[in-house]
Amino acid sequence: MAAASGSFDVETATRAYLDTLEGPAREQSDAYFEGGYWLIPLGTLVSVLIDWIFLRFRIAHAFRRLGERLSKRLWIVTWVTAALYTVVGFVMALPWSIYTGFFREKQYGLLDQSFGAWFAESLTGFAISLVMMPLVIVAIYALIRRAPKNWWLWATGVLGIFLMVAMVLGPVFISPLFNDYDEMEQGPLRDKIVDIAGKYDIPADHIYVFDQSKQHKRISANVSGLGPTIRISLNDNLLERTSEPEILAVMGHEMGHYKLRHIWVNFGVIMLLLALGLFITSRAAPWLISRYGGRWGVRDLADPASLPVLAICIAVFFFFATPVTNTLIRVNESQADAFGLEAAREPDGFAKVAMRLSEYRKIEPGALEEALFFDHPSGATRVRMAMQWKQDNVENPQVVVPEQGYLDAE
């Protein structure tokens, strides 16, 4: 990395980084990310279409009938219906999942797995869903039967409990099904990370590295878990592809999520959205069933065969809520960026990381485009924030002109 002196100007310093992504690399990054805009409505359409097939051809009705032949207990009938719905739904969605999760990622060079390895992980995720989803659905239908007027409120609480349990158990039991997690090796780099954490009273007894390079080359780190299982993890790509200032910048960002209690902030907002979505569903689903339930073989809302109706309502609600969820995450990420810059004090390391993320994230979107489709600040926004921090906090700051090709050099 080479440096050029002169009076420091935030826009000039920002431009010096942004201009290192150009030509085919920039075109591919923009094409990949912009193509993702269409995946949002198309994914919702696929989900709704599958649920419509369950209803139109009375498949959900047949699942419930099978459950009634197996048992007179309502919870068993619901469990059978939900389990079969989960299995058949997975199979029906498989072509879409294979295209979006495998072929499209391979097309843009963002996946290093073979199809067999990718599909094995998909089956693992499906197995987890097959355990959890029927339990959640059984609980929701029990509430619909016992509290037909305000079941949506009780269901929000039950889903919150399931979500909290998943957050606690995820790092210990679920994530290791996909990657190996090991303690970060002792050494100067870990010592610097621990020192940064110590300044903010952030527990750093356990810092984990996971082998995500077997899946792709994207750099990432995260804060996961809840209570006794909360931890900071970074993938091996971050260690192998980036410099020490970049690693410290990323770890400062992740510590920001912990210190700013974003896990709880996100949990609270998700609960509010779930409550609203379930409330709307509690009004829309009975109306749909009253009009079309006869041809679908659905008796009423308490009938487990109504499961695709609920799924359609929820899918449509969260489609329209996408800008809200994106904004929630983006605001939290921006706050963590600001914290990380102050904690690590590595503005150029932060800028380089922001540029590396352009492998799969459009670097310079329009303002409305970023507000609607970005769940993280864009690279341009992040680099500009870093350069503004540099101007405000570094004595005699210099404009850094990165060497061409530095994104692939490390």
Image (cartoon, helix red, strand yellow):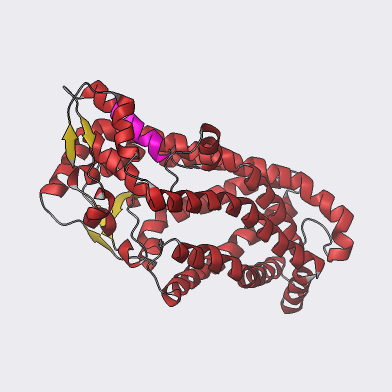
Q: Which residues are magenta?
A: 378-388
Q: Is residue 109 left or right of residue 323?
A: left
Q: Residue 341 in the image: x percent, y percent?
A: 27, 33
Image position, residue 159 (x, y; %):
57, 51
Residue 7: x and y, percent? Answer: 21, 21
Which one is nearer the viewer's eye here, 246 or 21?
21
Q: From this view, report whether residue 79 is shown above or below residue 18.
A: below
- For this orientation, the residue located farthest to the left is 188
Eyeballing the image, is 202 above or below 65?
above
> Which quarter of the figure has residue 44?
bottom right
Q: Nearer the viewer, residue 77 or 410?
A: 410
Of 386 and 163, the residue lying toward us: 386
Q: Is residue 342 left or right of residue 215?
A: left
All told, the count of numbered labels is 0
Q: Nearer the viewer, residue 111 or 18?
A: 18
Place of residue 401 in the rendered image (x, y in percent of width and height, measured from the top left):
23, 37
- 194 lies left or right of 64: left
**In percent of the image, x 45 and y 75: which residue is there?**
115
> Image quadrant for the N terminus?
top left
The residue positioned 34% from the left and 42% from the top of the image is 354
Q: Is residue 4 visible?
A: yes
Helix, strand or loop: magenta stretch = helix
* Residue name at image x 26 percent, y 21 percent: 392
Q: Is residue 383 magenta?
A: yes
Is 375 inside the magenta-drawn segment?
no
**Which quarter of the rendered picture does the C terminus lie within?**
bottom left
